[in-house]
Amino acid sequence: MKDADGNAVNLADYRGKVVLVNFWATWCGPCEAEIPWFIEFEKKYKDQGFAVLGVSMDDDGWKSVRPYIASHKINYRIMIGSEVVSQQFGEIESLPTSFVLDREGRIAANHVGLVDKVDYQNEIVKLLQDPKSIAIHDAGTGVLAGLTGASVRAGQRP
């Protein structure tokens, strides 16, 4: 996938960082509630090895997403998702859906629907404090190899 600037995004490039991958859409109310938190997390934890990646599932792509990014002053990378990308992440069926990945690219937590801000913050802080961190929830221990051509598979590394 490519970000809003046309640059290729590969999750393997984020190895060594804690990453929050958020599937969202401009028309999704709960998504809109989470975005300010993600902006804050990106600002607060970026220098500690953390990154947020947003994957918009808007049908009209950049037409609605670019103005939304500007109006909400989103400070993290946004890409446009597709059915193929959804399948690579285990079939995204509800928005928002988010994955918190540890520094090794393993899924430490996944959330479907609106989750309390403090839950995300606690997961992020715990993973940032432990460079060898492993899954903190039983929600998923698969590995996400990358956003281009990869699948979520247990035991696979980026």
Image (cartoon, helix red, strand yellow):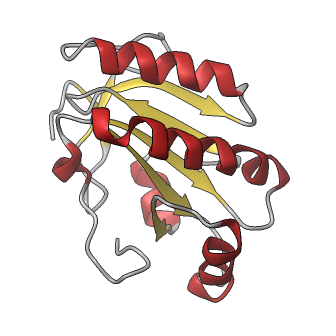
Quadrant the N terminus occupies = bottom left
Can you say whether 68 is above or below 33 in the image? below
Depth check: give the residue in front, 101 or 90. Answer: 101
Depth check: give the residue in front, 83 or 146. Answer: 146
Could you say where residue 104 lies in the image, as x and y percent from the top left? Answer: 20, 28
Residue at x-position 24% and y-position 59%: 10
Q: Decide if residue 91 is in sight here.
A: no
Could you say where residue 29 lies in the image, as x and y percent from the top left? Answer: 84, 53
Residue pushed farthest right? 29
Residue at x-position 17% and y-position 34%: 16
Residue 45, quarter of the rendered image? top left
Depth check: give the residue in front, 76 or 114. Answer: 76
Could you say where residue 31 lies in the image, as x and y percent from the top left? Answer: 73, 51
Would residue 96 appear left or right of 16 to someone viewing this image? right
Would residue 157 appear left or right of 50 to someone viewing this image? left
Quadrant the C terminus occupies = top left
Residue at x-position 64% and y-position 89%: 63
